[in-house]
Amino acid sequence: MPSPLGCYTKLQWFMMRAQHSKSETGTSVKVHDRLYINGQWTAPHSTRVHEIINPATTQVCAVTPLANEADCIQAIDAACEALPKWSQTSTQERSHFITAAADEMQRRADDLADAITMTMGCPRHLCPNLQVLGSIAAFRSYAERAKLMDQVEERNGIHILKEPVGVCTLINPWNYPLSILVGKTAPALAAGCTVIVKPAEQTPLQDFIVAEVFEKIGLPPGVFNLVTGIGPEVGPVLCAHEGVDMVSFTGSTRAGVHISESAAPTIKRVCLELGGKSPLIITEDAELETAVRYGVQDVMMNTGQTCSALTRMLVPESRYEEAVSIAQRVAEENVVGNPLDPTTTMGPLCSEAQKETVVDYIHQGIQEGARLVTGGHHMPPGMTHGAYLPPTIFADVTNQMRIAREEIFGPVLCMIPFKEVDEAVQLANDSVYGLSSAVFAKTTDEALAIARQIRAGQCFVQGAHFTTEAPFGGYKQSGNGREWGDEGLLEYVEVKAVLTH
Ligand code: NAI
Ligand code: MG
């Protein structure tokens, strides 16, 4: 751990460099030295800073403060103080703020995409559609949904009201950093909650832009607060403090367990969106080329860093080799490279650390006896540095192998053969996870019959695509609670019964 004095000097050095010069690669370093607390850009108590690495260049691209306990408490206090007034605003008022914020985010769409590409490597030309525009549209959709809060049910003199749960800590990961921030912040604000957000260490920049957006539109102080910090350091404060009523988290199962433990003594509501190992079942008479292409593209999207990725492809034995060769061809269509190059379809992994995790799993798959059809643990041709890996397909995978049981979170697909559809369903459900799933059959009805037997929060039938209109969340160890759609708002609701006689 660097000394505070060392860090302070470093921060000054970064600020000077950002103001007066360029980094080694000729791109400027984005320096943030304030947290957004109580509607003010607030100097942190701690002088420690965090360097954000661009995974394509492996160079420092930004610097943020590292909040400490005092900063977290200041943010929680601000959110607690803002709650009584904000929670009593009309749904029309909150809709107005949400719409104004969505408009301002739209104006900042390029900044948002630049920030995401720089910190996690999503190809810049794909970033608007994959990471930004849908997130803004989804943010806007909660302006309309706010009025769900006004619905009062009446049953024989019992009035059932919806009220905001209160102060919410929102902890986010780095794979879809804006989308996941929106999926928590928009429904929380629509419901009348106040929030403290903590982005992943690797990808904090879009959160600073979102804070600027809220500042610009005049969101009341304390309703939205931003702290940047190291998860295991600030997480326990943000999740245990008695002023916080709810924690919503997306990320690893490991961190989800820690967060639940921190939140348990004060009986907080905890909404977790964790890992997955989602199956795609393809039946014997399905349109094989379409089904396999869909499955491979789903896994390779965002360089395999999607919690709902369909990473286990279950294929009938009778069509297995045909499916493997289609998968290889589709995987090899990808162009791995610099995220700023408009021909790139797959950028680097988010970090060198994430690449190492994935490399370990690829070694593991080879050791376990899976057949490496394409890809592997080497740097893709022509690349010399950066967190790059090629799209990788393993065939002859059994569901007992670690590569079939554990979330890899990289561009790696496991192809598992089966004999009968019943066996495919059994394999699909033989997982500690249950986040997503998909089925391709000859007809939609046949696919739906299979879909009903899969224990997962979503099932994509005959090539359907993700939408933020549909509730999203996990069975089993993939988490609890739901995000998106009306259900995403209801997570932030307390039910109050008012009895009049
Ligand atoms: P992580 O779960 O450590 O990080 C996600 C967020 O949790 C970050 O904001 C981090 O600061 C925070 N965090 C970490 N420990 C915490 C704690 N004790 N209390 C409160 N907050 C804490 O994930 P990591 O290490 O970056 O990735 C490891 C694996 O997690 C990946 O390989 C992948 O399998 C999974 N993952 C799943 C995601 C999903 O969308 N469900 C997203 C990111 C990672
Ligand atoms: Mg971590």
Image: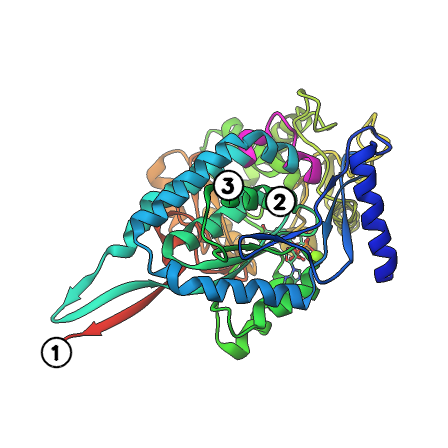
Q: Where residue 30 sits: x, y (%)?
A: 73, 39
Q: Nearer the viewer, mark 2 or mark 3?
A: 3
C-alpha gap between disc 1 and disc 2: 51 Å
User: Tags 1 and 3 in contact by the CB under 8 Å rule?
Assistant: no
Q: Quadrant of residue 328?
A: top right
Q: Nearer the viewer, mark 1 or mark 2?
A: 1
- The residue sitting at 48% across, 66% down in the picture is 80
Magenta stretch, residue numbers:
116-131
Disc 3 marks which amino acid? Lys
In the displayed structure, would residue 190 be above or below residue 210? below
C-alpha gap between disc 1 and disc 3: 47 Å
Badge 2 is on which residue?
A: 175
- The residue sitting at 19% across, 62% down in the picture is 153
Does label 1 or label 2 sit earlier along the sequence? 2
Badge 1 is on which residue?
A: 501
Disc 2 marks which amino acid? Asn
